[in-house]
Amino acid sequence: MIYLLLAAPLITALICLFPMKLRKWEIISSLGAILTGIVAIACIQDYFSKEKPIEHYGLFLDGLSTVLVFVIAMLGMICCLYSIRYIRKEIERQEFEEKRVGKFYSLIHIFIATMYLTVLADNLGVMWVAIEATTIVSALLVGFSGHKEALEAAWKYIIICTVGIAFAMLGIILTYYAAQATAGEEQFALSWHSLYPVAHHLNPSLMKLAFIFILVGFGTKAGVFPLHTWLPDAHSQAPSPVSALLSGVLLNCAIYAIIRFHLLTMEVTGSNFSSGLMILFGIISMIGAFPFILVQKDIKRLLAYSSVEHVGIIILGIGLGGTLGYTGALLHLINHALGKGTLFLCAGTIVQEYRTKFIQKMQGIGQLLPVTGTVFLASLFAIGGAPPFGLFVSEMSVAGRGFQVYGFGLGFIFLMSVAIVFTGLVYFGGKMYFSDLPSRFKVKEPLTINHVLLILPLILLVFQGIYIPESIQNIFFKVVESMIAGGGNHV
């Protein structure tokens, strides 16, 4: 079953490469996305029913992996289905050529497959290859329009992230060197489930150096400040469904790799070293992002810099550790994916209607696009951490852990950063929503399936802020308990 998570999107991608009518491409892409999502949910259910990791020829699904598999499945389905009307509109605007749509759908399904491989690979080397593959495929999607700005953003993305991934490779090589004498054969020295049980035998000095390379390398891919410079350009130039996947899923895949190495490093060196670095980078990302958020003029760059801040919150939560820290970080990972994915999809519709990305030219979205505009404004409140949305719960969990561990200082910095970003987001959103609609526009937004796709994540965010079912709570507690006990103690 677990291999179907890779096979389904790859087969879909292959079929989409064949010449056919636009409608057939849309049907194949949609069916492939839905099938992949069903397989993902089945794998997650299978894992929790057995209450032990699922291993199958190099693929490995444990508690931490299930969190990422859920995020990829949810956003993957939503973005693929949303793409149908979005791409049709782009063809009308002459931004896309109809004959190239099959390649777009093919690339987006390959992109989804590489992200699944990243979080399912048991071998560190395979995981690295998968992350590098996500860079190549997503760069093709970023530059898909062929515009000068998009191509420049794609090249910048490839160059910066490839350099970062090279640093991560050095970290993996050092980990392998430290583990080979203890773990035995080569394949075991690069295996997550073989490394954790023997972690206390690894060389602490080598593992410290390895973690520095890993944090810098995968931190570049995750968009950690100040390693984030590729992120605003790539997110703003990519087609909006791709932007949603980049921000909502891809960044989390890089964070997943950092978490894995963090848990391993803690087993070797104790918690102070890697946790201290995580906390430092988390705070820097939060503080570094908000000045850029407050001065943005481009709607998609505004959302991109918001992602830098939220990556900082997740990294900070993992660094703080404990039940509150880990729970808050994992919840925030899911909540941010849902909220930011929704925002980028809404932004795509808004940009198509106004034919600009400049915020000051987007007046009266509440009148022109009453459904999309309302979802967009509500999602800004959600991503800003306002109750009753789930991000309020996850942010307060991380803040609570900060107060527990470091007292007033860290908690105050956290809350002030969140408050400033919230103010900026709501200011821009309110200005766009409540301003008068220019006379050249007419209210013409019909209800479509895309509105359901936008509202669904918002409903989930409300439920996560008000009531999390006991069964879901138990799943999270099991994952968190395994992280606290040590990375090798899989759920």
Image (cartoon, helix red, strand yellow):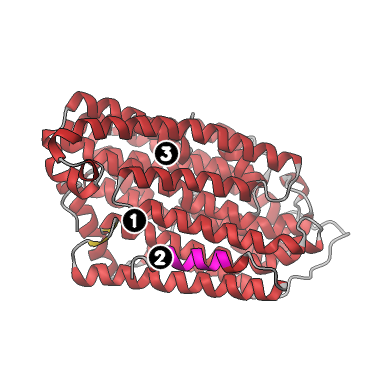
Label 2: few (<14), some (14–19) or many (≥20) C-alpha neighbours in 10 Å: many
Q: Which image quadrant is residue 321 in?
A: top left
The residue tagged 2 is 5
The residue tagged 1 is 120
**Which amino acid type is shown beneath numbered disc 1?**
Leu
Q: Position of residue 171 (x, y in %)?
A: 33, 31
Q: Position of residue 188 (x, y in %)?
A: 20, 45
**Badge 2 element:** helix
Q: Nearer the viewer, residue 449 or 197?
A: 197
Whether label 2 touches label 1, CB < 8 Å: yes
Residue at horizontal 50%, vertical 34%?
162
Q: Position of residue 14 (x, y in %)?
A: 56, 65
**Which amino acid type is shown beneath numbered disc 3?**
Gly
Label 1: few (<14), some (14–19) or many (≥20) C-alpha neighbours in 10 Å: many
Dot 2 or dot 1, earlier in sequence: 2
Real-space CA distance between mark 1 and mark 3, rounded to the nearest whole angstrom: 24 Å
Up-down: is 107 above or below 255? below
Instruction: Quarter of the image for the N terminus: give it.
Output: bottom left
The residue tagged 3 is 312
Callout in the foreground (2, 3): 2
Real-space CA distance between mark 2 and mark 1, rounded to the nearest whole angstrom: 9 Å
Q: Which residues are magenta?
A: 6-14
Callout in the foreground (1, 3): 1
